[in-house]
Image (cartoon, rainbow, N blue to C red):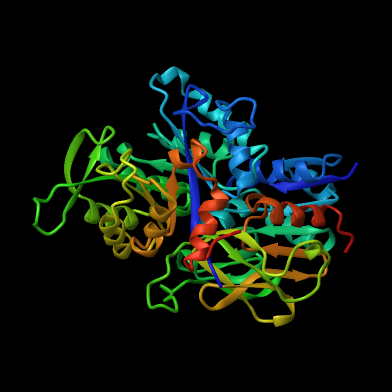
């Protein structure tokens, strides 16, 4: 017995409200981040991640209030990503009750920001989010590059090398999203996940492509992820976090039940 | 009304600690403070901590809190969390070597890339929900199952010289001291404020503890 593999529901938050349709039959307001987070906590979620997709800068304060409200009632780790660009952004999120922040494009445009952030707040609260896409030709050895702007903008940076570099710079955890699989429900990119997980010492969260419970289990067993992140299979009531854990446990994985 | 002080020395997420205490002790006054008098006049004290231990110790010294922490740890119900536990030991090898408060004799060391039983490498930081094996009966373990899971995030772990102060151990993959306790002091490597029901029960037991 030992450390459990984690299941992390991810909520997209726009202007303080959960979007992308969360459907719990028995909550009053499925757009309220507190209600949704409480429900996932009750289901046994190991952590909750909020992705702030608010487009306008002046509405970004709302995510701070969301984190404050959730952290007052839900006592499991909370991660906030989306639009984290400055040391002040990180401080505000941590002071509001977040345990970790996810840094994505700000790390690509200025890798030193990651070093500065981990020096200041400790590696334990800095998650670097990596959006990767396969760029090798059919039949050639697999190669993935990192992309920004939701997978639209190539950077020409090799994903494995980038992962190692971010860990050298102090990242305490990596959130790895396959842009090829995101939204497809065809399962994680297991080769990518395993390649990154084997290349770094820090925990890796697999993301992008979960369609069923077996995908979550495969992410850990085959992809060697330390945690799995999913949105739609939980949001639409297809499965609960408990069911996902029972499935993982039935295949010999250690989970917190 | 009892007063619970959470020592604020600028390191980490203190809001979660205070909110968790408020939720288990609705009738207590929970204050987050670096003020010496506030801490000294509290009925019980929580000593949290996150980040690098060198920075934590430097902040404690700058705020003239070192002696205050020693005094309250000698006299009041006292709960150390994470770095707030590691600081209670004699010495940490982090940041090139940092002397702690020496409330527990022992050292803090880095996890050397542990290998799991199946040969894969275990990750550092040790992050997530792991089991705590209760090594002794203690009032703070009331209503908490043996081997319950709590949330950890750390790269350094404590070793106490006196096995009698180890109130809980955790395997990663070898057993390390995840809980230290002696008289009025209880300290956990994990974060009770982030450990759902088991963590809240532990804090509730602390709030009601009469050592």
Above/below status of B159 relative to A131: below
- Quarter where residue A111 is shown: top left
Q: Residue at x 44, y 64 (%)?
A: B124
Above/below status of A56 relative to B43: above
Above/below status of B173 relative to A80: below
> Depth check: A115 or A231 in front?
A231
Q: Position of residue A243 (x, y in %)?
A: 54, 52
Q: Is residue A214 left or right of residue A7?
A: left
Q: Is residue A59 left or right of residue A224?
A: right
Q: Residue at x 40, y 34 (%)?
A: A82
Is residue A231 visible in this depiction of the protein? no
Above/below status of B46 relative to B188: above
In the picture, the quarter occupied by the C terminus of chain B is bottom right
Q: Position of residue B125 (x, y in %)?
A: 46, 62
Q: Position of residue B129 (x, y in %)?
A: 57, 60
Query: How many numbered callouts?
Result: 0
> Depth check: A234 or B58 in front?
A234
Q: Residue at x 76, y 42 (%)?
A: B23
In the picture, the quarter occupied by the N terminus of chain B is top right
Q: Residue at x 51, y 64 (%)?
A: A250
Q: Position of residue B99 (x, y in %)?
A: 58, 68
Is residue A166 visible in this depiction of the protein? yes
């Amino acid at each position: 017995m030992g450390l459990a593999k984690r299941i992390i529901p991810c909520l997209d938050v726009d202007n303080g409200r959960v979007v992308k349709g969360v459907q719990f039959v028995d909550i009053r307001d499925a757009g309220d981040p507190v209600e949704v987070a409480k429900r996932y906590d009750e289901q046994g979620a190991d952590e909750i991640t909020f992705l702030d997709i608010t487009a306008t800068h002046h509405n970004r304060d709302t995510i701070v209030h969301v984190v404050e409200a959730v952290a007052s009632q839900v006592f499991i780790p909370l991660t906030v990503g989306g639009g984290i660009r400055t040391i002040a952004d990180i401080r505000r999120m941590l002071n509001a009750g977040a345990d970790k922040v996810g840094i994505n494009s700000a790390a690509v445009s200025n890798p030193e920001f990651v070093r500065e952030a981990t020096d200041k707040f400790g590696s334990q609260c800095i998650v670097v989010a990596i959006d990767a896409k396969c760029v090798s030709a059919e039949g050639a050895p697999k190669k993935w590059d990192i992309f920004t702007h939701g997978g639209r903008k190539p950077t020409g940076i090799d994903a494995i090398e980038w992962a190692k570099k971010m860990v050298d710079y102090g990242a305490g955890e990596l959130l790895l999203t396959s842009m090829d699989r995101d939204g497809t429900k065809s399962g994680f990119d297991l080769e990518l996940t395993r390649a990154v997980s084997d290349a770094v010492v820090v925990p890796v969260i697999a993301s992008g492509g979960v369609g069923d419970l077996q995908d979550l289990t495969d992410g850990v067993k085959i992809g060697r992820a330390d945690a799995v992140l999913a949105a739609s299979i939980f949001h639409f009531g297809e499965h609960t976090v408990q069911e996902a854990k029972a499935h993982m446990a039935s295949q010999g994985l250690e989970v917190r039940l | 009304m009892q007063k619970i002080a959470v020592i604020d020395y600028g390191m980490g997420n203190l809001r979660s600690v205070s909110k968790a205490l408020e939720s288990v002790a609705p009738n207590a006054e929970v204050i987050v403070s670096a003020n010496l008098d506030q801490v000294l006049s509290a009925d019980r004290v929580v000593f949290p901590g996150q980040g690098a231990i060198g920075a934590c110790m430097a902040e404690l010294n700058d705020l003239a809190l070192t002696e205050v922490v020693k005094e309250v740890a000698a006299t009041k119900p006292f709960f150390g969390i994470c770095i707030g536990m590691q600081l209670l030991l004699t010495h940490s090898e982090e940041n090139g070597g940092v002397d702690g408060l020496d409330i527990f004799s022992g050292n803090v060391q880095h996890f050397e890339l542990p290998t799991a039983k199946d040969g894969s490498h275990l990750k550092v930081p040790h992050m997530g929900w792991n089991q705590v094996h209760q090594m002794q009966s203690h009032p703070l373990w009331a209503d908490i199952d043996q081997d319950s899971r709590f949330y950890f995030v750390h790269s350094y772990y404590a070793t106490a010289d006196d096995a009698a102060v180890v109130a809980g151990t955790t395997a990663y993959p070898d057993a390390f001291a995840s809980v230290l306790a002696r008289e009025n002091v209880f300290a956990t490597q994990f974060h009770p404020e982030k450990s759902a029901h088991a963590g809240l029960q532990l804090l509730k037991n602390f709030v009601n503890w009469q050592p």
